[in-house]
Image (cartoon, grey):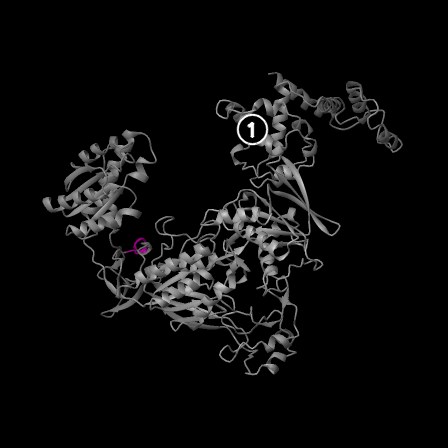
Amino acid sequence: MKIGVFVCHCGSNIAGTVDVVKVAEEARKLPDVAFASDTMYACSEPGQDGIINAIKDLDLDGVVVASCTPRMHEPTFRKTLERAGLNRYMFEMANIREHVSWVGKDKEANTKKALDLVAMAVAKLTQGKALISKKFDINKRVLVIGGGVAGIQAALDCADGGLDVILVEKTTSIGGKMSKLDKTFPTVDCSSCILGPKMVDVAQHPNITLYAASEVEKIDGYVGNYQVAITKKATYVDWDACTGCGLCMEKCPSKKSTDYFNEEVGTTTAINILFPQAIPKKASIDADFCIKLIKDKCGICAKVCPTNAIQYDQQDEIVTEPVGAIIVATGYDLFDYTKYGEYGGGRYPDVITSMQYERLLSASGPTGGHVKRPSDGKEPKTIVFIQCVGSRDKSIGRPYCSGFCCMYTAKQAILTKDHMPDSQSYVFYMDIRAPGKLYDEFIRRAMEEYGTQYVRGRVSMLYPKNGSLVVRGADTLLGKQVEIEADLVVLAVGAESAVGASKLAEKLRISYDNYGFYMESHPKLRPVETNTAGVFLAGSCQGPKDIPQSVGQGSAAAAKVLVLFSKDQLESDPQVSVVDIKRCVGCGKCIETCPFGAIEEIDFRGMTKSNVIETICQGCGICTSTCPQGAIQLQNFTDNQILAEVNVLCQQTLEKSFE
Amino acid sequence: MNTIRLNTACDADFINQVEKESEQDMSLCYQCGNCTAGCPYTTFYDLPVNQVMRLVQVGQREQVLSCKSLWLCASCESCTTRCPNDIDVARIMDVLRHMSRRAGHATERRVKIFWDAFLSSVERHGRVHEMGLMATYMTKTGRMFTDIDLGMHLIPNGKLSLKPHTMIGKKEVSEIFKRFNEERSS
């Protein structure tokens, strides 16, 4: 076998602490190595050309590149090999940057370790063989999970691109957090006026199937061929019959039901349509409050419904949809401010969240857009906004900045002045974060045109006094403690990952960070991809985002799906397990241990044998270490390849091992 | 002009010493001001506590150790409770107070006298003898009539006894003082 070794300088990244010339020199002495040299940047065009020329000139069978982590450049070099006419799997990478040069300063030791890694890669390659990918058909349908603005955008873009879209929304209407907002920054345009048309587009698009009041139950399969089980939760209303006339809402006697859409600022009826612009505009019953469902009395809605749509005995239903790709757009939830004792911990009715204030400002909200404070319904004159409630606070486990609170607080301060010209708003802030087009200008407008008083400091306590709330905080620019008697206190609550985010991640087999936000494949270069092929991210499920960013990501994820579906067939990764049928004794241990259900039992000339379904196998290798016969082998990581690596490392002279 | 030359006037040893003695990381403070916001004594301070923190961050030894706030701090720990970065601010104030004393600053003389009188009373009797403490404090400060009106109510209730209280473990308490004094002098 003729192997070529290329040792990369990576500028000074590797060459700074590894003697790359020496590594190449020593590598030349290894068995099967026909060529070895150092190269400034192996991944650059001249670097890759050098590899191609060596393969052609010396008729090499395989290549080892000693450079960085394979995560970034393994695909690069595999393509290089293909361009030179070699099989892409006749390639090994020795990571002498992350594993050597970046972690140690001792040049001599580093050089020796680099050479060990190169020798191991060479040894593994000598046992390697060419692998061929198989092609499989894909199902060009896409599942979008979450009907907020990011999910809506992704669904519309995919549908306009000609794909069949399944949109699953947990609540009874799409629209997400944006549908609760009164206005949006920095333009102060009406939120439902710009979101509404998109929601209607979803309802009317021939390519979109909308499952509202539904959740993803189970996901099986692999990129191109997923099977998704969706639970359609019982709404106790036949949505095919319901016309959304709202008569049931008028007559329902259970009028103290929790109004989730209005953030519990008001109450609603047990049977309700979430909000006037809801899509789908269908009624559903809240089983926690329905008198018929609790006590088997009432039944008024069934009597008044002109289309006989009420079905008290409706059950959850599971439907299965085959799709080829999944866009996750499950959004965020708001921080529970009652964790802060100093803000009353929920004891003071006139301390409300920013989202509750948004509903008070909204013309379609419970107060019809008139700001009335919860305690006595009076119009507040002095309003205090407290920023960073559940953001940038390590002591409550939320060290990150939620990113959009500075902006929405400024917007709410502006709206407050618009609603009540004789009011005065104060904003307690730590830093103003307004990096976006026209964002900082917007903050300035709140101060300059609307007279909002910005106070640089945090609030330490609130206490009630004569029907008001005294807000005691600091003005660090004055170096003074300050107090404001406020009629209403609005807490700019931060974002946290959506309830149930980690559970869904496990179903999708994607990873999430310490706070439950989903991990993108690369923080800069692959922002909407995940490490699971065919699963993409959009919006705040990946981290807090404002509307423009969420919409941008929705479109980006849609573009990624369209790219994926631009081919009719995908190539499977041949680095999967393969059963040597002669060795297999049919014990079935591999079937039990496979976490993906990728191994099946087959009948081979009357004998029981195992068989790997290549498209499902993820190449984890658990079966390989389970098989008592060594009959099942993970391709490109066979026992022979791994033992060759171990041998080259361990069969050195004693002296060398201890160096 | 009161310009502080941030690079040359920064006493890095001072920062290190405060961090070491208090076991706190000064760089964690992002100056939100919540310590000042909750401080019940900030009205009497010459420097609000967040500015004390800032001055430590930029290594201004003299200004910190000679300020009055250190001696007025009641160690109520509101600052520690409120700090979003879990910094034990009250402990830093305590460390600074010790450093200030060692450096010969005691900007609030009466506070120092009160503490010294309190501790010597505990050293002698195992717990504080209120009457003795009062007497020492009054003689040393010359404030003969401070809070005398309160005393009128306390004496009939038996809260101001003429004789020191007897207590178990008196010897052990004085041992603590002995050990402390030995360690300090060594």
Q: Quadrant of residue A310?
A: bottom right
Query: In the figure, residue A430 lies in which quadrant?
Result: top right
Q: Residues within 10 Å of mark 1 (few under 14, many from 20)?
A: many
**In the image, is residue B166 above or below residue A632?**
above
Rendered location of residue B65, percent (x, y): 61, 23
Count all numbered tags in the image, as a single digit. 1
Nearer the observer, B19 or B69: B69
Disc 1 is attached to a residue of which chain?
A: B
Main SS, magenta residues:
helix
Q: Which residues are drawn in magenta? A: A624-628
- The residue under the point 43% across, 73% down is A204
The N terminus of chain B appears in which quarter of the rendering? top right
Residue appearing at x 34%, y 49% in the figure: A525
Pick the residue in front: A166 or A265.
A265
Point out the residue furthest to the right here: B156
Disc 1: which residue: B56
Q: Position of residue A270 (x, y in %)?
A: 61, 71
- In the rendered image of this protein, does residue B126 appear above or below residue A576? above
The location of residue A33, given as percent across then percent down, is 15, 41
Is residue A299 in view from this perspective?
no
